[in-house]
Image (spheres, helix red, strand yellow):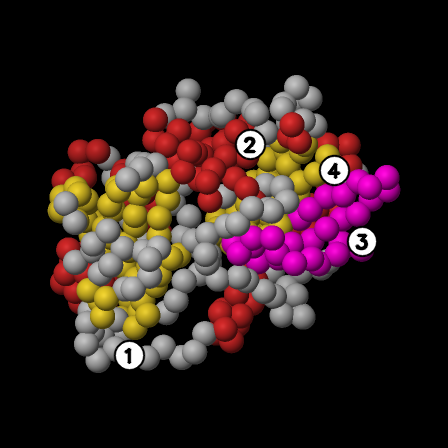
Amino acid sequence: MVSPCSRNLLAGWIGCLGLLLFSGCQREADIRVYGVPKQVPYSLPDGWERVENTSAMRLATFRIQGEDSQSAEVAILPMPDLQVGDHEIVNLWRQQLQLDPISEKDVATQSQPVQIGDLQGRQFDLVAPEAAPGEMAGMRIITAFVHAPNGTWFFKLSGENAFLEGQKQTFTDFLSSVDLNSLKESISMVETAASPPPVRPAVASVNESEDLPKWDLPSHWVPTGARSMILASFAADGDEGKVDITVSRLGGGAGGLLPNINRWCQQIGLDAISEEDLPMKTTSINVDGSPATMVFLAGKEKGIAATICPRNGQTWFFKAMGNQEAVTREKSAFEAFSQSIRF
């Protein structure tokens, strides 16, 4: 049984990620397009052709051409601030292939471990039933992902079932050749080359993008741009260190309040909390007429301040992360920023 939160999450994510499964011919969100330098951080198999990305969310796309017009596609998808569970991820692909969803306890039995660079990830091998409607019938997706220190990475092989059977080992070999740190550096190099140096605002500024809510920006926060699923980001420097502030959005309930807080606890070395602990970690606030939740987590070294705001069937995340002392320094500014948000 899939929880209501999971169903809401799937509904929202189908809109922004589901179309990545196959050709990606429809438009994606208006976010930065990735590219990779000529010296790529992986070993490219023979017969894989680098092609233009069909989605701005992709770091790289490859085509594998076979006989009799058979073909497959491989995509690399970086997700730096993913906030959903493994079973919710795979259920996106299962729903696209007309397969029943699985529960969290089914993940281990429905997937296999796979080596992705120096880390162990998980791989799901999914085949649509022949009775599936339209172009989905007989399609197959072999998707691998890994939760790395520098973000979550997806590697997706898709195409017709019979053709992918002969490509599976080559895909596995490719995954083991990947250098995730070099991939992350590639993204940073491209983003730096595409963006002018940030200019420190002299006064508090207001976001002018039509795709984002408006807010009053603290005068010492420097905009650092959008990337992948991060719609906006800022940096706040001080004697205690730098704090990175990000704005992101997911569909539906985005997995629920407690799972997201526990994911953040894991990021900064804290034990998971229970429902009974929520009042000690959260504060209910009002953001532009809607109820929201503010979270403050202090670990031994790192800290997180975050505002979670459900709005019109979506969930907005405003998150500040850095050294614990630096996040404490920015707490008042972050609270004022959160209270200023206008949808």
**Residue 337 point in image, percent of width and height:** 19, 61
Disc number placed over residue 164 in the picture, else none: 4
SS class, disc 3: loop
Dot 4: within a 10 Å radius of its alpha carbon, few (fewer than 14), some, or many (20 or more) residues?
many
On the rendered structure, is 69 left or right of 113? right
Disc number placed over residue 47 in the picture, else none: 3
Q: What's the residue type where badge 2 is placed? A: Gln
Please tell me which of labels 4 and 1 falls first in the chain: 4
Specify start and end residues of the magenta stretch as a single range: 45-74
- Marks 1 and 3 close (CB-CB < 8 Å): no
CA separation, marks 4 and 1?
Answer: 50 Å
Please tell me which of labels 2 and 1 falls first in the chain: 2
Q: What's the residue type where badge 1 is placed? A: Arg
**Residue identified by numbered label 1:** 200
- Marks 4 and 3 close (CB-CB < 8 Å): no
Residue 8 falls in image quadrant: top left
Tell me if residue 123 is in the magenta stretch: no
Please tell me which of labels 1 and 3 falls first in the chain: 3
Please tell me which of labels 3 and 2 falls first in the chain: 3
Q: What's the residue type where badge 3 is placed? A: Gly
Q: Look at 46% across and 40% down and name the residue there.
A: 15
Is 156 placed above or below 160 here?
below
**Residue identified by numbered label 2:** 96
Observer-side mark, 1 or 3, equals 1
CA separation, marks 4 and 3?
Answer: 14 Å
